[in-house]
Every structure is written in structure tokens, then in C-alpha cells.
Amino acid sequence: MAQESAPATTDGRGPVVIVDDDVSCLAAVEQIVRHWGHDTVTFRSFEDARAYLASATPAVVIVDVRLGNYNGLQLIHFSQERSPATQWLVVSGFDDPVLRKEATKLGALFLTKPLDLGKLKEHLERNERPATSA
Amino acid sequence: MSVSPNSEVRLLGTSEVVRNILADIDCAARSGAKVLITGETGVGKEVVARLIHHRSARAAGKLVTVNCAGLPDSLLESELFGHVRGSFTGAYRDKPGLLEMAPNGTVFLDEVGEMSARMQVVLLRFLETGEIQRIGADRSHTRVNVRLITATNRDLPKEIAAGNFREDLFFRLNVIRMTIPPLRERIEDVPLLFDHYLALYCEQHRVERPEISQAALDVLLGYRWPGNIRELRNVAERIALKSVGQILRPADLPSELLKPAQGAPLVAGAAAPTHSAQVEEMTQRMLRHGESFWSVVYPVFMARDLTRADLRRIVEIGLESTNGNYRLLVALYNMPNEDYKRFLGFLRKHNCHLPFQRFRTIPSRVSSGNVPRTPVAAAG
């Protein structure tokens, strides 16, 4: 497994990682996030995202709860220790209070679909500030 | 249903599969999140659950195991949540539920896929509130702090599609998913596991531990193990109880292991009649002139100048001369010992791997006839 971290962009920000097994959702979010000027890395499966996160420490990860057999929250559980600074946005098609609580407990932002783009943009901008000022 | 002490549990094996599972167990243990363990029957789902508990921050608490299969709703609910006196016939006194009995511990729900629709709702509600209400109790809710680990051998997404399992419950239970592969996908661990259990049971039953012959090992490695590790453990125990003597031979193994696997490549005898001159000539070159299988048969077969039936016949001749011993056959056809795996792989790939058992029956008795089969007397 490669030990190098995610390629950083010219201004020092890492890419925004997007994980969703629904291809059209993934493409839509990717396009919007790119439109706002962020680089993106996308994954369509839990396994691929997990393999990537085993060596990368991205600033932001947007992850769907439903990833085939897996729950997106597992990615947080399995990578948080290695990458504590990563900000997680958990996206879910249904508002389950239990999952919302668990995501919040992990320090993640829980968003339901359809996405509130204003909230998403605000969150991404808030996260890039410490990185750019550093 | 049991409340277990912090007994020593281990996941045996050196395969990559086992190493990955152990790494995931550590991740899951540290996280504290709910875990859903899936895998065929007998793969060791409960062992994994125990390891997660013992390596977690809750290790000082209890681990309570509940098997959800085979219990009627009312009984399962009463087991999990408890009941108050007089809530149903036979409820003579208050009884706490198992969820209450593991404060700051872990509750392991095995066979969670067997839960009825009603129990699924009850569990769903518990997950949301973290509160339990004993059956028959008015409104005295108790909050409990337990971690839930669940396991099933069912394909839950399929059960959801069929309307047998609640999707919302699945997503709440399936925060961390661990899939335990069947034994046949880590067959390289079989010798170690078998050795371990054989030693264990021989000691337990105070019998001399037999040495495992290569042929017996081949049978163990060639078997599909549908019952996984539980089946392997049972086989080891049966061997120990049978007191086979000094050497464990294929004939000592349970008969189901000796039957050709389902979907085995060849029906015995199918290759028999085509005894072409070409086959004759090739076997003579290998047997009499010391030429290697790789130079005599392989290129011709790969060039499609030799049929599968012919190749099978060549293998059959070899097995007939070696009492069904593929290792000897490799030597007989002048291949180095290291080529054993490659040779079997080649045969399997081309569906020419014949079950060796039928070549074994008669002569193996001759060689083992002098080995006494008297059981070793139990000491003490």
C-alpha cells in the first residue's frame, strides 16, 4: 500500500474526497464541488475508499451512508485514528435519528438528500481556511 | 444463552485473510460502534465478537450472548428485556433481561436474521432510545449502556428485498461490517487448525496424538468444508475419540470427506475407454525413459493435440500405479516435488483432476495392516 498522502493542490489544500455508490449522485456532487474550485477524488465503493484512506489524510470527505453492504460511518471509524484532522460530511437519503446521532458523536456533519448546497459550501469553505492561512 | 467470563479466545491462522480480520477486529474494538458480523455457519462469528469485546474499552464489562434463532417471540423478548412478576403465565417473579445484565459491557445477538418482524420493531426502538422496559412493566424505563454486536449467516440485503428484514434496522446494526470468509477461502490454514484441534481433543480424551499422513492431509486440503471450522473441529474430535493409532490415514477420516466434492470435474470411468496409442506412447516415455510430464504431455496438450479424455487417462494410469497418491504420481512422471501444486493447478484448470479416493481402497490396507488399532488406554 502506498504510503504517500493525497496529492496536494497548488494552494496547499488537499482534494475533497467523495464516496457514493450511486453514480449519478457522485457525479453531481463532484461537479458542484469542482465548480466551487476544489479538487476532487471520487470512489464508488467502500473497499476502494478504504484502501485510499489507508494512506491518505484528506481535509474533507463526503460519504454516503449506504455503500453497498457497508455503512459510510465505518470509514470514519476505521480512519479517524489515522487521520484525526479530516472533516467528515455524512450524506444520507433518509433521516435516521440513530445514525444522525452516531455521525454527530463522531464529529461529522450529517446531511440528508437532497443536499442543502448552501450548507455544504459553507462547510467546505470553513474547512479550507485553516489550511490556507497556515 | 450465556454470560461468559473473559476467557481466552483466539483466531487461529496465518493466512492473509486472518491477518486482515485481526486488523479489522482491532479497529472495531477501538471504535465502540455497533458491529454486524456476517459469514457462513461455523466460520467463527462468535469468536470474532468475543475478540472485539475483549479488546475493547468494555473488556471489564460482561459479554452476554443471545441466540435469536429458535426462540418464540415472547421468550426472546423476555430474555432480552426481562419481565415483571405476573406479566404472563409462569412469570412468578421479576426477571431482569440480558440487556440489563451487561452494564458497560457487550451484548452479542447471534442469528439476528432470524428475528421476527415484531422483535425487529422492539429492537429498533431499543436502539433509538437505549431504554428497556420489562414485559408487563408500566412505565419504568431503564437506560442501559451496552454495545451491540450482531451476527447472521443470512444475506440481509436479500432478506430486505424479500420483505423479511427491516432496512432501517439493518442500517442501524450495520455500522461496522465484518465479513468472515469460509474456511475453503483460507485453506492454507487447515493444517494448523486441524493440528491444533487434534492436539486439544487428544489431550482432552487422553489418547495418543496420531501423526497426520500426507495422504490424509491431502484429503483435508481437498475438502470443501461446508461446515467450516466447526466441522473441522468436530472431525478432529471424532478422530481423537476413534483412537486411530500412530498414523492418521485417509481411511480414518469420516466418509463425507472422502466422497468427491459436488461438482467434481470428472465422473469416474468416463475417461476409461479412450485408450489411444498416443496415451500409451506418452506414458511409456515417462515411465520407462524418465522423460518429464512437462516435456512429454504438457506441450502436446496445450497445442490441443491431446484431448482432455486422454490427459485424464494419463492421470488415471498414474493414480492406478501409485494407489491414488498425487505426490508419488508427480515423482512417477518425473517432475520435481516442488511442482506438485503447479501440476494439480494445471489439472484443475483443465478439469482433469481426478478424485484419488477410488484408487486408494484396497492396497492401503496392506501397508497399514500391521499398525495396531488398539485405543491407547486413558491414563489415571
Image: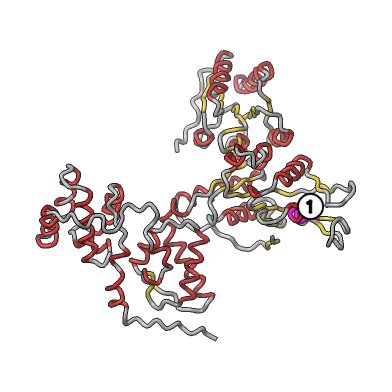
From the viewer's perspective, is B44 left or right of B276? right
Q: Residues within 10 Å of mark 1 (few under 14, many from 20)?
A: many
Give the image location of residue B42, x and y in percent: 54, 57
Q: Is B79 included in the stretch rendered in magenta?
A: yes
On screen, A31 above or below B190?
A: above
Name the residue located 18 percent from the left edge and 59 percent from the top edge. B333
Query: Is A109 on the left or on the right of A27, as rendered?
Result: right
Prevalent SS, magenta region: helix
Identity of the residue drawn at 29% across and 57% down = B354
Q: Residue at x 65, y 27 (%)?
A: A93
Q: Is residue B378 visible?
A: yes
Amino acid type assigned to the residue bearing label 1 in the image: Phe
User: Residue B75: x, y in percent?
Assistant: 75, 56
**Between residues B102 and B228, which one lies in front from this camera angle?**
B228
Please report the residue visible at 54 percent of the width from the left and 29 percent of the height from the top.
Answer: A21
The total number of labels drawn is 1
Q: Is residue B325 above or below residue B55?
A: below
Kindly identify which residue carries mark 1: B81
Q: Position of residue B182 (x, y in %)?
A: 48, 52
Residue A80 at least partly seen: no
Closer to us: B4 or B227: B227
Query: Does residue B355 appear to the left or right of B42 in the view shown?
Result: left
The chain letter for the residue carrying disc 1 is B
Write the start and end of the magenta stretch as one range: B76-82
Quadrant housing the N terminus of chain B:
bottom right
Task: Classify mark 1: helix, strand or loop.
Answer: helix
Q: Nearer the viewer, residue B377 or A76?
A: B377
> In the shown orientation, is residue A76 left or right of residue B43?
right
